[in-house]
């Protein structure tokens, strides 16, 4: 595992994920490692085969492919901003945007890129939120064949 050559860091553009990115930046500087900054666009639930949804008094067009395209464009722009703003100059950073279930896609990219380490934050959700949403970090820990470093973020930083 050491020295680290490739580090994967998923981000959902939340403050906890930026805390993990700080750690990744330090590791990448120390080891001169490449960074794979990843954002996963979640699937959009399908309403039905309808192309539009009628709500009393209004008609909404549901152009899901266009919506996903806009989400992907925004994610690419935000990844670029994070590379410029949050990473040390001179580091090699790859920006990756994919569609799917976050944990599954993170693990798949880690395999494809043969990373040495996955670094991600935990949001610290408990109770019904954890039960309902699950934990991406928890699932990555279970599925990944690579070492995983989780960064627990204090509640005051969330």
Image (cartoon, rainbow, N blue to C red):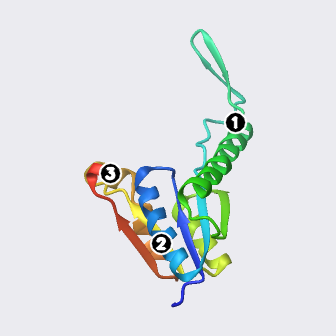
Please name the residue shown 51% across and 80% down the image: 30
Q: Secondary structure at mark 3?
A: helix
Q: Position of residue 78 (x, y in %)?
A: 61, 48
Q: In front of the other: label 1 or label 3?
A: 3
Q: Which mark, by number, is residue 26?
A: 2
Please name the residue shown 52% across and 82% down the image: 146
Q: Is 118 displayed left or right of 36 in the figure?
A: left
Q: Is 152 displayed left or right of 87 in the figure?
A: left
For the residues marked 2 and 3, what is the alpha-carbon distance in whole angstroms? Answer: 19 Å
For the residues marked 1 and 2, what is the alpha-carbon distance in whole angstroms? Answer: 48 Å
Around disc 1, counting alpha carbons within 10 Å, would you say few (fewer than 14), some (14 to 19), or many (20 or more)? few
Q: Position of residue 33 (x, y in %)?
A: 59, 78
Around disc 3, counting alpha carbons within 10 Å, would you say few (fewer than 14), some (14 to 19), or many (20 or more)? few
Figure check: 74 above or below 104? above
Q: Quadrant of residue 94?
A: bottom right
Q: Which residue is mark 1?
A: 49
For the residues marked 1 and 3, what is the alpha-carbon distance in whole angstroms? Answer: 42 Å
- Between residue 49 and residue 105, name the one nearer to us: 105
Q: Secondary structure at mark 2?
A: helix
Mark 2 touches mark 3? (CB < 8 Å): no
First reached walking from the N terminus: tag 1 or tag 2:
2
First reached walking from the N terminus: tag 2 or tag 3:
2
Figure check: 65 above or below 127? above
- Between residue 32 and residue 60, name the one nearer to us: 32
Q: Which residue is mark 3?
A: 157
- Between residue 156 and residue 100, name the one nearer to us: 156
In the picture as drawn, the residue positioned furthest to the top comes out as: 57
């Amino acid at each position: 595992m050491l020295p680290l050559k490739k580090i994967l860091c998923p981000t959902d553009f939340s403050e906890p994920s930026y805390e993990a990115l700080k750690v990744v930046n330090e590791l990448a500087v120390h080891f001169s490692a490449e960074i794979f900054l990843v954002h996963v666009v979640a699937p959009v639930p399908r309403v039905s085969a309808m192309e539009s949804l009628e709500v009393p008094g209004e008609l909404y067009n549901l152009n899901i492919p266009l919506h996903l395209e806009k989400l992907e464009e925004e994610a690419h722009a935000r990844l670029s901003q994070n590379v410029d703003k949050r990473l040390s100059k001179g580091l090699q950073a790859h920006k990756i945007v994919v569609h799917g279930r976050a944990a599954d896609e993170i693990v798949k990219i880690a395999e494809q890129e043969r990373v040495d380490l996955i670094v991600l934050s935990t949001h610290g959700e408990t109770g019904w939120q954890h039960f309902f949403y699950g934990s991406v970090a928890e699932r990555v820990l279970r599925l990944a064949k690579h070492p995983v470093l989780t960064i627990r973020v204090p509640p005051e930083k969330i």
